[in-house]
Amino acid sequence: MSVLGQKIRVEQRTSRARKSRASFHYHPEKVLFVTTPTQVSSKELFNLVKNNENRIHKLMQVAQADPQICYPLNYEDGCTILVLSEPVRVTVRTSNRIQPSYQNNRLTIKKPLDVSLKGVIFAWYKIHATAIFQERIVQMCEKANFVDAVPPWSHRFMSSLWGSCNRDRKVKLNSHLVKVPMEAIDLVIMHELCHFIHRNHSRAFYELLAEQLPNWKQTDNLLQNYGMLLCEEPPTERYRQSKRRVRYGA
Ligand SMILES: [Zn+2]
């Protein structure tokens, strides 16, 4: 369909995490993702897009200004992925076992022909994210004097939240954070740590956050530009298989 004179493809997603409003994300390859709490008809979808034309136009401008903030619509030899906000070129080689190697902003993936490239890349992302997040959590806990020990934490690919923490002070991070700037990872971690003291998003919560990270607002705006990365669905069956193979086979 056409938004303010530009032809784009519209894809609908549903997410139970969305309470009422629709959210919009724009992929620089001219795809608009519309996420709603429940399935909507194509007419409703059309109206949602029409009624939010100005908001969508802003997203399109952000994407045009920084087209690097995206993920490959097709994973193939020569595609570019993001690692800590830097574009990383992927080279694929055929081999009888899976072996990713990451050096000088290049990711070389050796894999059998029948193994999904996206699956191997996501498995690699998981491993890489674990190392980065572990280091950043330790750093942020040292910085936050109200935290006395590194809390239990985990990460997985999620479609609506960058992070969360429960009443038992267990921190859950979104694995997609491996693609955003380091300061934005720090912000998400610190945000969750501040919830140890204030459960809600009260004024006191933001005061505590600002004490820890004075530039948090700026970083938060930066992170919002990466919101479209959450639209990418992780691979399924193949992914689990290649995850196992990457972990133990490489
Ligand atoms: Zn929060």
Image (spheres, grey):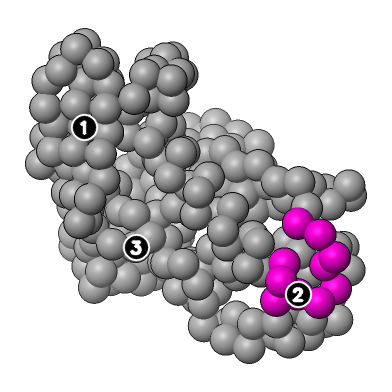
- Identify the residue at horizontal 53%, vertical 45% (top origin): 130
Q: Position of residue 182 (x, y in %)?
A: 46, 67
Queried whether the magenta region covers residue 222, the answer comes back as: no
Please identify, in this view, whether the residue under mark 3 or under mark 2 is nearer the observer.
2
| CA neighbours of label 2 inside 10 A, class few (<14), some (14 to 19), many (20+) | some
Pick the front one: 125 or 33 = 125
Which structural element holds mark 1?
A: strand
Q: Amino acid at mark 1?
A: Ile
Instruction: Report the side of 12 relative to 188 (left or right).
Output: left
Residue 135 in view of the camera = yes
* Magenta part of the chain: 141-150
Quarter that holds the C terminus:
top left
Report the residue marked by disc 3: 85
In this rendering, is residue 26 above or below 43?
below
Which structural element holds mark 3?
A: loop
Report the residue marked by disc 1: 109
Report the residue marked by disc 2: 144
Main SS of the magenta part reads loop
For the residues labelled 2 and 1, the Cα–Cα distance comes to 38 Å
Residue 239 lies in quadrant: top left
Pick the front one: 179 or 13 = 179
Answer with mark 2 or mark 1, whichever residue precedes in sequence. Answer: 1
Which structural element holds mark 2?
A: loop
